Amino acid sequence: MKIRNLLVLSLFSIPIICFSQDANQGKAFTLNGRIADPKLDSVSILYINDQGKVSREVVPTVEGTFKITGSISQPKMAYILFIHKGEKLSRREAEIKTDKVFIEPAEMLITEEADANGFVKVKGSRSQSEWNDLKAKTRSTQLAIDTITKLYPSQGHGTGSKTIKELAPYRAKLAKINYDFFYSHPNSYVTANQMMFFTSVFGLDTLKQLYDHFTPQIKASVDGKRLAAEIRSQTAGKPGSVAFAFNVKDKDGKELSLAAFKGKYVLLDFWATWCVPCRASMPKVIALHHKYKDKGFDVIAIGDDDKNVPNWLAAIDHDGTGIFHQTLRGMDIDMARKGISNPRDLDEPYGIHALPTQILINPDGEIIGRFAGNDEDLAKMLTSIFKF
């Protein structure tokens, strides 16, 4: 299974942009640097500002000192990169060297670059102290996960792979450490921010429990609102709820309406060309389609390839899934960065953050099954439905 984050930013392919700030929309922040390193040349910082825009600034250093200013309404995660004289970094090298820091609407001070374990100490930022605390708790477990993943890079797909089996206890431990931190820090912007990376790991009841434990201040934060929207989305996409009645265009530009399938069992298959488990499951879904299509079963495949339509169409042709109804997810990255709800994005009303995900809808438009790439459970449910 491929886990997706809500915000996927390509940090170093974004041009430097300057934005004017409305003084009423945020408070000034100042990030001072006094680092005793004569080789330090400049510092790059990137974050999402209050207008939902990517703000990136590169400031030169003078004898290890620098000053970065801006305006934000609340603590938020930023990405900082220390660049040394004569240093020429590839995009990948720059990404590896980049550190995460939490900036706050206050005056802050950095006196050292990240230490050997990747910890950046920012005086004046309580959120950064909390972030370092969480990183310290998860570091050894995360290192174990990274090591196993590197050992078996080609086996990380499928529930029976060696990688999945070896990773399972470490992933469970990582989830438990994060859960404990989230629950014990209900007034932390770090909690709200990092919980967004666990929306497909924790169950819906756990997400609700943690969110309900938030203070009003964190519920009102940008990430708090995103989490609330995610909970609403997952609630709407779970078995027992009425399926979102979408009306979109299919791959041929024709109308594709869920209402037109009333009276049938419909499988919504959320997939992507780059998702290996998704592509691997296609022959099984095709077999199920052939087996039950004359008994009132149909498939709508929803591709997560809005940015690469030619690849999407080529994959449909290659995999032989043109027999399904095919449409795109409707992703809009600019709306996602701003935290704006996108009515065209079919992932939102169905709470999709992992691929493949398959949702089975009955003839009355009610969701009766949700499968995280588990073809066997899907096949068993269909066998039960069509046994007569």
Image: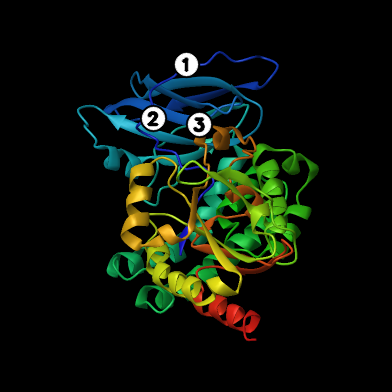
Query: What residue did someone put label 1 on?
Result: 18
Depth order, front residue of 343/338: 343
User: Which of the marked residues, 3 or 1, is nearer the chain's N terminus?
Assistant: 1
Query: Does dot 1 land on a helix, a strand or a loop?
Result: loop
Q: What crowding class fits label 2: few (fewer than 14 Cα within 10 Å), some (14-19), or many (20 or more)?
A: some
Query: What residue did someone put label 3 on?
Result: 47
| Amino acid type shown at disc 2 | Ile
Q: Quadrant of residue 105?
A: top right
The quarter in which the C terminus is drawn is: bottom right
Tell me residue 189's x, y (percent).
65, 43
| Amino acid type shown at disc 1 | Cys
Q: What crowding class fits label 3: few (fewer than 14 Cα within 10 Å), some (14-19), or many (20 or more)?
A: many
Please name the residue shown 66% across and 37% down the image: 222
Separation of residues labelled 3 and 1 (CA atoms): 12 Å
Tell me residue 328's x, y (percent).
49, 47
| Amino acid type shown at disc 3 | Tyr
User: Which of the marked residues, 2 or 3, is nearer the chain's N terminus?
Assistant: 2
Separation of residues labelled 2 and 3 (CA atoms): 22 Å
Q: Are marks 3 and 1 in contact (CB under 8 Å)?
A: no
Query: What residue did someone put label 2 on?
Result: 35
Depth order, front residue of 229/306: 306
| Residue 176, above or below 56 | below
Depth order, front residue of 220/257: 257
Specify whether residue 143 is in view.
Answer: no
Foreground: disc 2 or disc 1: 1
Query: Does dot 3 land on a helix, a strand or a loop?
Result: strand
Depth order, front residue of 74/317: 317
